[in-house]
Image (cartoon, rainbow, N blue to C red):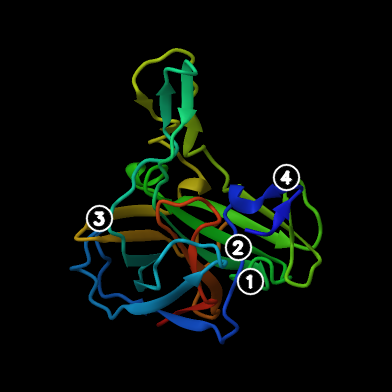
Amino acid sequence: MSHLVKGVALCSMLIWTLSVHAESVVVTVSSLDQPPKLDGQLGDWLIEPQIIRLHKAHPGVSVALSELTMWAGHFDDSIYFAFRWADAHPDRQHKPYIWSDEKERYTVGPQREDRLAIQFQIEGEYDVNWLSGNSFKADMWHWKSSRSAPIGLAHDKMTIVGREKVIRSFKAEGVDGEPVYIRRISDSGDKLYSHKRYVLKESKQMPKYLLNANASGSIADVKAAQRWRDGAWTVELTRKLNTHHDDDVLFQFADDIPGGIAVFNRSGDSNHVISNNLLFRLER
C-alpha cells in the first residue's frame, strides 16, 4: 500500500481506503416478529436478506470476495445483524508465538484470523473511504474469529477521522494530497484481551493473546455468535438500540445512519474488501 504514516506503511492499521463513487445503498432494518437466537444459524431469520457488494480496499488487496449476504432487523429494544460470506477455510488463530530453536525464543507466527467489521456514523460526514477528506466519528463493531469470537463478543470501538491532528492518531494522505488523521480506540470498559509474554519455552506454539471472558463496560456491548460450515462463515451480532454510552451509535427511527462493512480473510489490516457507503434505515 502506498500511503505512509511517518514512514511506516499503513499495513499496521485497519483502514478503508477506496470507495466506488455511487449513491449509498439503503439497508432496511426490518421489524422482527421475534428475536433470532444467537447461535450462528439462520433458520429463525424470517426476513429477506440483502446482498452487499464488496470491492478491494486498494489495488494490492489479495482477498477475493465480491459480496456477502446480510440480514438486519430489530425487536423490542435491540438490533440484530447476520452475515454470511464464502471462506474456504476458517482461520481462528492470530499471531501465535512459535518457538525458534535457532533463536532460542518465541517469534510471531504467520497465522492471521478472519474478521468482519461494520461501522455506523456517530457524528460528522461518514465515508467508507477514510481518506476522502470527510471528518467523522464512527462506531465500529469488529468481530474477530480469534480475539473476540471465543468470548461471544465483537470488539466495540470508535474510529475518529479528521483534518486536525489528535493524540495517538495516524497521519495519512487524503485523496486530495492533504493530511488526514485517523484514530481507532476501544470503547470504555475492560480490555477484551491482553498480550502474553514468554521467557522460557513452554510448548512449540503458544497464544499471544489472552482473552477476558468477563469483560464489561461499553466495549462489551455487542454480543456475537458464529459458525463456519460448508465453506462459509455465518456471524450474528446484536446490541441495544440505545446503550446510553457516548461512544456508541444511537439507533432510532427518525434517522438514516451512514455506515460500511469490511471483511478480512486470514489477512492483515490493510488487506481487506469493503462495501460502498451504506444507509441503515429502521423500519417501523
In the picture, measured across the screen, residue 252 lies left or right of residue 175, that is left
- Asked if the residue under mark 4 is in contact with the one under mark 2, i.e. CB atoms within 8 Å, the reply is no
Question: How far is the residue under mark 3 from the one under mark 4?
Answer: 36 Å
Q: Residue at x 48, y 73 (%)?
A: 55
Label 4 Cα crowd, 10 Å radius (few <14 / some 14-19 / many 20+): few
Closer mark to the observer between disc 2 and disc 3: 3
Q: Position of residue 160 (x, y in %)?
A: 67, 58
* Res. 118 in view: yes
For this orientation, the residue located farthest to the top is 200
In front: 254, or 164?
Answer: 164
- Asked if the residue under mark 1 is in contact with the one under mark 2, i.e. CB atoms within 8 Å, the reply is yes
Question: How far is the residue under mark 2 from the one under mark 3?
Answer: 28 Å
Q: Position of residue 174 (x, y in %)?
A: 74, 67
Question: How far is the residue under mark 2 from the one under mark 4?
Answer: 17 Å
Q: Amino acid at mark 1?
A: Tyr
Residue tagged by mark 2? 138
Label 1 Cα crowd, 10 Å radius (few <14 / some 14-19 / many 20+): many
Quadrant (top left/top right/bottom left/bottom right) for the C terminus: bottom left
SS for dot 2 = strand
Location of residue 64 (image quadrant): bottom left
Which badge, 3 or 4, comes first in the chain's sequence?
Answer: 4
Q: Position of residue 29 (x, y in %)?
A: 40, 77
Residue tagged by mark 1? 126
In front: 226, or 5?
Answer: 5
Residue tagged by mark 3? 228
SS for dot 3 = strand
Closer mark to the observer between disc 1 and disc 3: 3
SS for dot 4 = loop
Residue tagged by mark 4? 168
Q: Amino acid at mark 2?
A: Ala
Which badge, 2 or 3, comes first in the chain's sequence?
Answer: 2
Which badge, 1 or 4, comes first in the chain's sequence?
Answer: 1
